[in-house]
Image (cartoon, grey):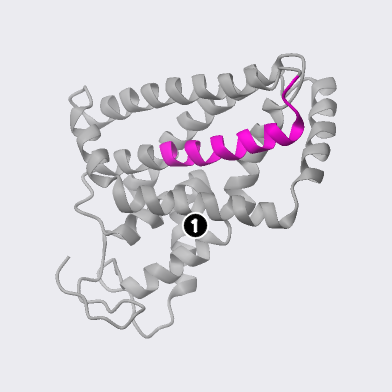
Amino acid sequence: MTVRDNPRLNVKAADWAQRLASRVNPADAAKISQRMLDTIDDVSSNRWDAATRRAAALPGDIRPEKIKSLTDSFSRELGAAGAAAGAAAIAPTVGTAATIMASTAELAWFTARAGDLILTIAATHGRPEPTVDERRAWVLAVLIYGSSAKDGITRAINEASTGVSPIVDRRVPLATLQIANRVMSRSLFRRYGSRRGLIAVGRALPIGIGAFIGGAANYAAIRALARNADQFFARLPYSAIDVDSTDLTGRQLGPL
C-alpha cells in the first residue's frame, strides 16, 4: 500500500495541510508566485545554451534513448534532493515556519531544474534557436498544463490573439506570444504551485514519512514532466514567432 492509499495518513496529511495553509497569507503566496516566475524568466533567458550542450552530450543514437538517459539522471538528482528535504522535517528543532521557508527555497530550485529539463528536451527535438519568449512559453505550458500542454498553450495564444496580427503558417506574432505568457503566468501558482505545495505538505509529515514522500514525489514528478515535455514538443503546433513581428514596446524586430 502506498502512502497515498493509506486512509490514516491521508487524514494526517489533511490535518497538516490545514495547519500549513493557515501560516501562508496572501502576501506570502504572491511572493512565492513571483519567485517562481523570476526563476522561469532566469531559466528562459540564460540557460538555453547549457540545455543544447546537455542535449548534445546525451548518450544514445535516437531521441527516445537520449530522453530516457536525461530523465533517469534528473529523476535521481531531484528524488535525492526531495528525500533530503523530507528528512529535515523529522528533526524536532525544525518548526512549521522553517519547513515552509525551506519548501519555498526548494520550490524555486525544483522549478529551475524542471525548466532545464524542459529546455533540454526541446533541444533534443531540434527546436532551432528559440527566442526567450518562446522558451518561457514552453516552460510555462509544460509546468502548468502537464500532459495537456499543447492544448493549454493553444488556448492561451487564442485568448491573446486580437485579430490584428493573425497567426499565419504556424508562426505566432511576438506581441501575441508575450500576452499569452502573461495569461499562462496567472495560472502558475494556482495549478503548478498547488501541486508542488501538496508535496511540501507531504514532506512536512512527522514520523519519518516526509523523507519517503519527498523523494518519491520528486522522482515521479520529473518522470511525468519529461514525458509531458517530450509529447509537447512532438505535437507543438507553433514552430516559431513571426520574424517581422512588432513587440509590445513598438520596436520593429529584425530577423531572429
Q: Is residue 112 magenta?
A: yes
In which quadrant is the N terminus drawn? Answer: top right
- Residues drawn in magenta: 93-114
Q: Quadrant of residue 229?
A: top left
Nearer to us in this view, 145 or 253: 253
Look at the picture and state if 6 lies above or below 238: above
Is 46 placed left or right of 182 in the picture? left
Residue type at mark 1 is Gly
Q: Residue 97 placed where, x, y %?
A: 73, 36
- One can see residue 251 in this view: yes
Is 215 placed left or right of 149 in the picture? right
Look at the picture and state if 40 lies above or below 216: below
Q: Residue at image x 22%, y 44%?
A: 49
Main secondary structure of the magenta stretch: helix
Look at the picture and state if 210 lies above or below 252: above
Residue reaching furthest to the left: 255
**SS for callout 1:** helix
Q: Residue at image x 59%, y 24%?
A: 85
Q: Quadrant of residue 250?
A: bottom left
Look at the picture and state if 131 lies above or below 118: below
- Bin the neighbour count of mark 1 within 10 Å (Cα to Cα): few under 14, some 14-19, many 20 and up: some
Q: Residue 83 placed where, x, y %?
A: 57, 19
Q: Residue at image x 47%, y 26%?
A: 78
Q: Is residue 21 magenta?
A: no
Is 120 placed left or right of 191 in the picture? left
Residue pointed to by mark 1: 152
Nearer to us in this view, 190 or 172: 190
- One can see residue 230 in this view: no
In which quadrant is the C terminus drawn? Answer: bottom left
